[in-house]
Amino acid sequence: MSRLASRFAKLKSQQQKALVSYVMAGDPHPEVTVDLLHQMVDAGVDVIELGLPFSDPMADGPVIALAAERALAGGTNTLDALNMVKAFREKDSSTPVVLMGYLNPVEVIGYEQFVATAHECGVDGVLLVDLPPEEADDFNAVLKKYDMDQIFLLAPTSTDERIAYVAQHARGFIYYVSLKGVTGAATLDVSEAANRIEKIKAITDVPVGVGFGISDATSAKAMGVAADAVIVGSAFVKQFATLAPEQAVIETVNKVKELRAALDELV
């Protein structure tokens, strides 16, 4: 059983919801990331989503786009991000790590080399924002070869056909984008998102996580009622835009604790 499957099975048995944290690799500089990941796990994160810095992050709002700029300016590339996972694994062999990024850097490296290296470093899954599920067979075949999961996105605009396709092919978990727009958007219709999540869960046993627009205890708890996991990114990443790295880490860990406490109230 994969780390993702094991983690979600354990949480389900305890009637708990997963807290999935997004962190941009190398933001604001490479020395911060690995220790930050450990501190976030200690504070209550169940699954890490590690962003791969990219110069044209079209699905991301300004908070994460600027984080990518900071990481790139600090010298972090895709292979550096993989090595951060490897360093993280020296102390943590159980927390699942999913890479989130874009297709171009993966194609530059090559599917086989990228996935083989990611597997060797301890990565459990990959989400490529701009690789549609219907066009992902070749990449998915390489991931399966290395027992890694491909995470797919669904959105409010997803057709019934797309939902059915993803439900059939998904592994690890399904990432439901709770609103129309980019990461960090502010308007979240909890009722609509919950209805869509229930629709997805009715046709699959794969866990469903929800992200975009979740920034505090109230929104996390509201979405945790319907979803198996709550995915938070911009609320963490934004700390590094205005604060010194040491203080940003403290604020990020405090935010994790706030969200973890909110989700635990659902038990």
Image: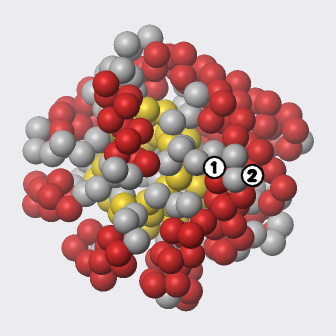
Q: Position of residue 42 (x, y in %)?
A: 66, 30
- Camera-side residue: 32 or 122? 122
Crowdedness near tag 1: few (<14), some (14–19) or many (≥20) residues, C-alpha within 10 Å: many
Q: CA distance from mark 2 to mark 1?
A: 8 Å
* Residue at figure coordinates x 40%, y 64% from the top left: 148
Measured as percent of width and height from the top left, residue 64 is found at: 62, 54
Contact between marks 2 and 1 (CB within 8 A): the answer is: yes
User: In front: mark 2 or mark 1?
Assistant: 2
Task: Tell me: 52 left or right of 250.
Answer: left
Amino acid beneath label 2: Thr
Tag 1: amino acid = Val
Q: Which residue is mark 1?
A: 23
- The residue shown at (63%, 45%) is 92
**Residue 33: which numbered mark, if any?**
2
Name the secondary structure under disc 1: strand
Return the residue nearer the eye: 118 or 54: 118
- Label 2 residue SS: helix
The residue under the point 58% across, 55% down is 50
